[in-house]
Image (cartoon, rainbow, N blue to C red):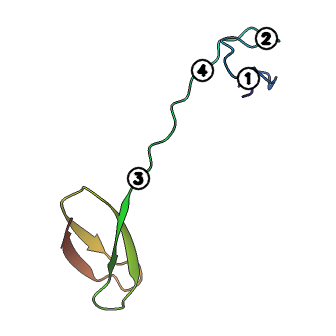
Amino acid sequence: MYCRSCGTSIPDHGKFCPKCGKAVEEVPPKQAIEYQYFFCSKCRQKLRVPKGKGKIEITCPVCRNQFIVMD
């Protein structure tokens, strides 16, 4: 881990930078987003949509075809 202020290496469980004294900001890990894949009915382009969004309208970026999918 490195200090965001001065770039000095900080021990894994350090609370402050040993060089500049700034407090270490804990950044929570990003949660993995799960996706569902659909194919456009007109041009067969593969489209990625986040799971758990329910009924959504998708516009194909290739052919501009619009269709509704249920998650």
Residue 53 in picture, x, y percent from top left? 24, 56
- Residue 33 is labelled as 3
Considering only order in the chain, which callout, 2 or 4, is on the residue closer to the N terminus? 2
Q: Is residue 39 above or below residue 5?
A: below
The quadrant where residue 45 appears: bottom left
Q: At label 4, which amino acid type do we have?
A: Glu
Contact between labelled residues 2 and 3, with CB atoms less than 8 Å apart:
no
Looking at the image, residue 23 lies above or below residue 25: above
Mark 1 touching mark 2, by CB under 8 A?
yes
Q: Is the C terminus in the top left, top right, bottom left or bottom right quadrant?
A: bottom left
Residue 25: which disc?
4
Q: Which residue type does callout 2 highlight?
A: Cys
- Mark 3 vs mark 2: in front: 3
Q: Residue tagged by mark 2?
A: 20
Q: Earlier in the sequence, mark 3 or mark 2?
A: 2
Image position of 62 with respect to 6: above or below = below
Q: Which of marks 3 and 4 is nearer the N terminus?
A: 4
Please rate how many residues cluster around mark 4, counting C-alpha atoms within 10 Å: few if below 14, some from 14 to 19, many from 20.
Answer: few
- The answer to whether the residues at label 3 and label 4 have Cβ atoms under 8 Å apart is no
